[in-house]
Image (cartoon, rainbow, N blue to C red):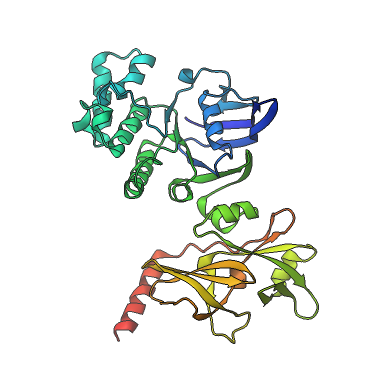
Amino acid sequence: MGQLETRNLTKIFQDSGQEIVAVDDLDITIEDGEFITLVGPSGCGKSTTLRSIAGLETPTTGEVYLDGQEITDRKPKARDMAMVFQSYALYPHMTARENMAFGLRMATDLSAEEIDRQVTETAEMMEIGNLLDKKPGDLSGGQQQRVALGRAIVRDPEVFLMDEPLSNLDAKLRTQMRTELQALQQDLDITTLYVTHDQTEAMTMSDRIVILDDGRLQQIGTPLECYHQPVNQFVAGFIGSPSMNFFEIELNTQGEPTFVHDGFEMKIDEDVLTDVEGHESLTLGIRPEDIEVVKADARNAITKQVQVAEPLGEVTYVHLEIGQQQCTATLQGDLVFDAGQTLSIRFPQDRIHVFDGQTGNALRNREPPARDDIEAFAEGQVDETARSDA
């Protein structure tokens, strides 16, 4: 078992007589074997939360539970947790074998032979068996990271705690290690709490995401729930790259209901009106990939000049100025755009998000994508190929 829980967790620091609330009344429950990622901007409280759970910080108020037993006041070594740090925290004078064995020597009564056996087995699993006699200074960043992970794995803990363990790696290696780490966690089936500011890591690795801002919980959900159905404008803007586009709008109900912005007017259907009616100020949100290219005379078309086009191969980011606001559209990569070119786009009503302009709370979210039948999808692709060949 490895169920982890925080109840009303609060951590307040004192700075020159002023209180700084790093974590504010946080309630989260992580089920046994679940991979949960804490994500948010710098200073949001994610590392402080992790350190409080590990016992490296003492909560001001609130409790931490492991498998239903309170562990708030237990020392770190008595919590049956293993932590992987951003800096790897390897002892430079020890070999990789000695670094991996250190925790077992300090915290268990295992014999030297049994410790060596466990270290060797873990090293082979991590594909670093040939590096065990090398010291950290002789290892690359990726190899050091594997040793640090191996040191945590060899202890066979109830919970893994990981504080941005991939942030010191280059982009290509980070992508590789992200996949390997996810596969490893699934194989080991160990409860994992992972801290990162990288939303790509959060989206690709997690069973669920915990999104924090200014020490407060904003949303807990699966990656796709947080992406497609954010509870507020902060979550909508933080999750996703490029970020969601936002436009401050007014609702005009004289005649056909219409969203009015300095750079466009958008006629809306009855279901949209039902969700937003009665709110004085509104913010419209649309993700870049949900924007459509349409003909200039299409309903709700917005015709503007391309400011900048960024071709990436698979997709092209097109930047437009709409009413003195920047708008980014993610379009297919085989479309070629030039700066100054006129382009007509549209915000499909089934994909827009609308937020209360004062509270930021979501009033309307796009419907989540349906789970496609893979066989039917594959057949459709075959049909498309046949038509193309014909």
Where in the figure is residue 162, as x and y percent of width and height?
44, 34
Which residue corresponds to the image point at 52% horizontal and 23% vertical from the top-left?
56
Where in the figure is residue 364, as x and y percent of width and height?
67, 62
- So how many labels did they put on this image? 0
Please state if 152 lies on the left or on the right of 249 as rendered: left
The residue sitting at the left extreme is 130
Task: Decide if residue 90 is in sight here.
Answer: yes
Please tell me in which quadrant of the rendered image residue 378 appears.
bottom left
Please state if 336 lies on the left or on the right of 228 as rendered: left
From what the image shows, is residue 144 above or below residue 371?
A: above
117 or 254, nearer to the observer: 254
Which residue corresponds to the image point at 72% horizontal and 64% vertical from the top-left?
275
Please tell me in which quadrant of the rendered image residue 110 appears.
top left
Task: Decide if residue 68 is in sight here.
Answer: no
221 or 166, nearer to the observer: 166
From what the image shows, is residue 80 above or below residue 200?
A: above
Where in the figure is residue 293, as x and y percent of width and height?
52, 78
Where in the figure is residue 318, as x and y percent of width and height?
48, 70
Q: Quadrant of the C terminus?
A: bottom left
Which residue corresponds to the image point at 69% horizontal and 29% vertical from the top-left?
19
Please state if 298 lies on the left or on the right of 272 as rendered: left
